[in-house]
Image: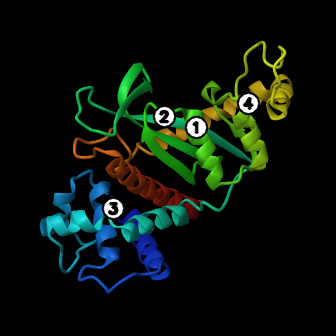
Amino acid sequence: MDSHVWRVVYRAIREVDRVLPRVGRRPVFSDVLIVAMYVWTVGHDRPLCWACDRRHYGSDFRPRRLPSVSQFCKRIKTERCDGILQAVHDRLARSDVGTQLSYLDGRALCVGAHSKDRDARSGPAPGGMAKGYRLHAWATEDLRIPIWSVVPLNVSEKTVAGELLNARRAVGVVLADSNYDAGWLYERVAERGGQLVTPLPENAGSGHRRQSPSRLAALHLWDALGAYVYRDRLKIERVFGSTCCFGGGLGPLPAWVRTLPRVRRWVGAKLIIYHARLALRRRAV
């Protein structure tokens, strides 16, 4: 991991730790240390046991004392450590800041077809059916991912989009592919203050069934300039590409990252590193 990126991440971890309430007595190994060790490990694409070996640290990060493997694995699962990871992501991704154009899409995170992972499920993926999970992202025009979720592959993209809308208001136009074409989802986006735009079939708006007013509005918008606006939806592919185009980025799930809680924690740490890189890039401009 780049030393400049690490400084941004470590500073955010320390600042968030000061704000989050603490329950119970102070542990021997601080939550800052545990979370920092985890992000350091994820940034180097190594398993948790790797983090408990002093030889794997350098001048950028060299803890005085390290917990045992069992202590580290137990502590990183605690509610407060998960809360720190989430708060660091929200701070670096500026989750309270929206843009007039945003994008909904998903990216498959596959595991082996014969994996014993009890949480992985079979579902559609590039090239056909696969087994694993899907990262659902609500990205902004400036390439941030303020809101995201990881669920098994068999969960509908529309269902997850509805859950993401519970956590964030929609601002302006929300672009998505045809997998998100549903009347109830159009209405949910409109209720949250935005306008969903997806490719629509030729017979959209016809028939005798009641149509969502928001979907009909999207139909008129599509006829006017929807095809032109929809070209910008490809920016979500640029966002997904940017999350994995650097050392320590979000590539295929390694063999030691299995079950839904571990996958979510791993992906969250990768997105923290990604947003730290974005923050440095914004400062350089």
Q: Could you say whether the residue bearing mark 1 is in a helix, strand or loop?
A: helix
Disc 1, disc 2: CB below 8 Å?
yes
Which of labels 2 and 3 is toward the front?
Answer: 2
Q: Could you say whether the residue bearing mark 4 is in a helix, strand or loop?
A: helix
How are the colours assigned in the image? rainbow
The residue labelled by disc 1 is 159
In this rendering, position of residue 205 left or right of residue 239? right
Residue 145 at least partly seen: no
The residue labelled by disc 3 is 39
Q: Percent from the top left, x then y, of residue 255?
A: 22, 41
Q: In this view, does 267 lie above or below 135?
A: below
Return the residue nearer the eye: 146 or 123.
123
Q: Percent from the top left, x then y, of residue 161?
A: 60, 41
Q: In the rendered image, which quarter is residue 52 located in?
A: bottom left
Amino acid tagged 2: Val
Alpha carbon of mark 2 to alpha carbon of mark 4: how far?
18 Å
Amino acid tagged 1: Thr
Circle 4 crowding by C-alpha within 10 Å: few under 14, some 14–19, many from 20: some
Return the residue nearer the eye: 240 or 21.
21
